[in-house]
């Protein structure tokens, strides 16, 4: 598309859906990663300039897999090997993954597809705790929506579990006892067969967590990150997108260029025409 056509489309108006979750102290997150913390080491009035001006500043600490984020290929290994076949331990010598860290994840501006699974299955509020989303479910969702999944797409899978993110009982969203819905290993292979660039979901683990099992086994992570070279995004806010029945859009996201890190926070956007 010529640049002037793209600019004219923006001038006519676009709708932007913010798919990133609010980052705040105490938010629900995976227990496997360092918690988010935010503090003000300098407050207004701590130092006042001669002209009366003052400034405040912050310090933030967090794991790179907290809140809405993307997994780098360095995040998961299988039998000691990473996606490129390299030795996972050797690749981390020096405390950085020089070849497969978050700094190597490209900015994404591509076609995005929302698969609103619970609506397609007749349970629009969401899938049941611990429900395994199968290839048949994904196919049924595509058929109902009348869309397609193509090579290079970013596919976002709504389970409906995102409605629990703001529950004052943070354990509900984590779902340790209840389990959390998500795709199966077969569902991950369905995505891999279609050559998608990345896949995301509205949960902390992307894939199905069985009741009481926690993160003990994550086969979809193995299939996508290690076997197929497909990025994974987690803790997306997909509720507004689904409510507006926006199933195809321009997906925009860019990780922070943390050198050698295993993941990065992102603030993904779904962009559609203003009509």
Image (spheres, grey):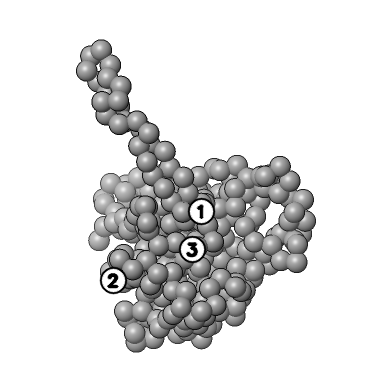
User: Contact, CB < 8 Å: mark 3 with mark 2?
Assistant: no
Q: Residue at x 71, y 66 (%)?
A: 78
- On the image, the x and y values in percent for residue 87 come to 77, 56
Query: Callout 3: helix, strand or loop?
Result: loop
- Closer to the eye: label 3 or 2: 3
Q: Quadrant of the C terminus?
A: bottom left
Front-most of 126 and 142? 126
Q: Residue at x 32, y 58 (%)?
A: 17
Residue 34 tag number: 1
Q: In this view, does 149 lie above or below 109?
A: below
Q: Which residue is drawn at 55% across and 77% down?
A: 213
Residue 133 tag number: none
Q: Furthest residue to the top?
A: 50
- Location of mark 2 (residue): 243
Looking at marks 3 and 2 on the same chain, the residue that comes earlier in the sequence is marked by 3
Query: Callout 1: helix, strand or loop?
Result: loop
- Location of mark 3 (residue): 30
Q: How crowded is mark 2: few (under 14 residues within 10 Å), some or many (20 or more)?
A: few
Front-most of 154 and 121? 121
Q: How many labels does the image show?
A: 3
- Left of 16 or right of it: where is 107? right
Q: In this rendering, does residue 269 appear at all?
A: no
- Distance of mark 3 from mark 2, alpha carbons? 26 Å
Query: Callout 2: helix, strand or loop?
Result: helix
Q: Is residue 191 above or below residue 153?
A: below
- Closer to the eye: label 2 or 1: 1
Q: In this rendering, does residue 160 appear at all?
A: yes
- Distance of mark 2 from mark 1, alpha carbons? 33 Å
- On the image, the x and y values in percent for residue 204 come to 47, 66
- Distance of mark 1 from mark 3, alpha carbons? 9 Å
Looking at marks 2 and 1 on the same chain, the residue that comes earlier in the sequence is marked by 1
């Amino acid at each position: 598309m010529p640049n002037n056509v793209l600019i004219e489309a923006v001038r006519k108006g676009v709708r932007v859906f913010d798919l990133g979750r609010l980052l705040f102290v105490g938010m629900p997150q995976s227990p496997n990663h360092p918690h988010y913390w935010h503090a003000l080491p300098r407050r207004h009035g701590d130092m006042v300039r001669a002209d009366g001006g003052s400034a405040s500043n912050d310090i933030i600490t967090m794991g790179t897999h907290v809140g809405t984020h993307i997994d780098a290929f360095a995040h998961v290994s299988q039998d000691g090997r990473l996606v490129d076949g390299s030795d996972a331990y050797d690749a981390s010598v020096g405390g950085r993954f020089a070849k497969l860290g978050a700094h190597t994840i490209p900015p994404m501006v591509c076609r995005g597809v929302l698969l609103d699974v619970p609506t397609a299955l007749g349970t629009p509020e969401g899938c049941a705790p611990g429900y395994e989303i199968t290839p048949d479910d994904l196919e049924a969702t595509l058929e109902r929506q009348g869309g397609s999944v193509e090579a290079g797409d970013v596919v976002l899978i709504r389970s409906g579990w995102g409605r629990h993110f703001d529950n004052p009982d943070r354990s509900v969203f984590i779902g340790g006892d209840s389990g959390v819905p998500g795709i199966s290993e077969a569902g991950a292979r369905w995505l891999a067969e279609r050559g998608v660039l990345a896949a995301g979901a509205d949960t902390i683990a992307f894939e199905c967590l069985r009741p009481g099992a926690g993160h003990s086994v994550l086969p979809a992570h193995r299939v996508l990150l290690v076997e197929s070279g497909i990025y994974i995004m987690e803790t997306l806010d997909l509720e507004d997108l689904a409510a507006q029945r926006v199933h195809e859009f321009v997906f925009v996201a860019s990780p922070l260029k943390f050198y050698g890190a295993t993941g990065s926070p992102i603030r993904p956007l779904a962009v559609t025409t203003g009509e």
